[in-house]
Amino acid sequence: MAEGTRFEIHLPALKHNFQQIKKQLQADTKILVVVKAFAYGSDATAIGRFLEEEGADYLGVAYVREGIALRNAGIQIPILVLHPQIHELSSLVEFQLEPCVYSWRVLHALEEILTAQKTKAYPIHLKFNTGLHRLGFSVDERYALEQHIKSSYAHLQGVLSHLAATEDPAERIFTLGQLDQFNLLKPVFGENPIYHVLNTSGVFNYPEAHHDMVRCGIGLYGYGNQTKVSELLRPVG
């Protein structure tokens, strides 16, 4: 009988990549490890456990069910859900996952659950659209959101955006424009939230924008989208 295909994760390479990224950061800058889509085709639980031990501050997943699997595996560090669905918000709260809130509809639905449960100061991250045009509040809504959160059962744990082209030198002006938009948020929401906007390419190309946390996904698995970045990294499989 022929053997099935087996994919092996080389944990020393993963550790090397994590350390290479960490070297680019200030000592107090947090690292969120993105393990969505089964950690880009590997094993989210194994990688999540390993990087929790290595000092990752957050894990990031796409959907609530992925976060629940990590919690059931015993992972304790904060987990950010990047695309929470309204019908899963009750489970999100039950498993102490932190939602990326990208619309008033999601915010109000979550607040209904928190109010019904009398759960106060529940951590959320507000996502703003600074030019990628996927999901997110308009930067122009920042003042309305700041006033709303003051009387909400939600606590503003983080403020984030996604950049479109941090790996492309030809798009540097556009990226700097996105960063300028993101910089409009801090004077409104203050110093306490965790501000995070950069992916792996952004970590290497825009050190001035590391803020409080960076989000690293594919780079941890050994691929940097640029030759100069990839040369520092080792494929994990």
Image (spheres, rainbow, N blue to C red):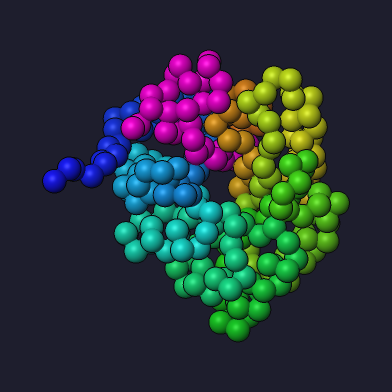
Rendered location of residue 166, percent (x, y): 66, 29
Up/down of 89 relative to 5, above or below:
below
Figure disc tally: 0
Left or right: 137 as drawn, with respect to 60:
right
Report the magenta residues as a range. Answer: 211-237
Comparing 52 with 134, the one in front is: 134
Q: Which residue is located at x 53 percent, y 15 percent?
A: 228
Quadrant assignment, res 85: bottom right
Q: Quadrant of the C terminus?
A: top left
Q: Please state the horizontal and vertical placement of residue 76, each as a whole percent of the image.
A: 38, 57
Residue 63: x percent and y percent? Answer: 52, 59
Q: Does the stretch in magenta take in 234?
A: yes
Left/right of residue 152 with respect to residue 237 in the rendered view: right
Visible residue check, residue 161: yes
Q: Nearer the viewer, residue 87 or 204?
A: 87
Q: Position of residue 125 (x, y in %)?
A: 63, 56
Residue 171 figure quarter: top right
Q: Is residue 70 above or below residue 204?
A: below
Q: Seen in the image, is 74 located left or right of residue 186?
A: left
Q: Is residue 10 magenta?
A: no
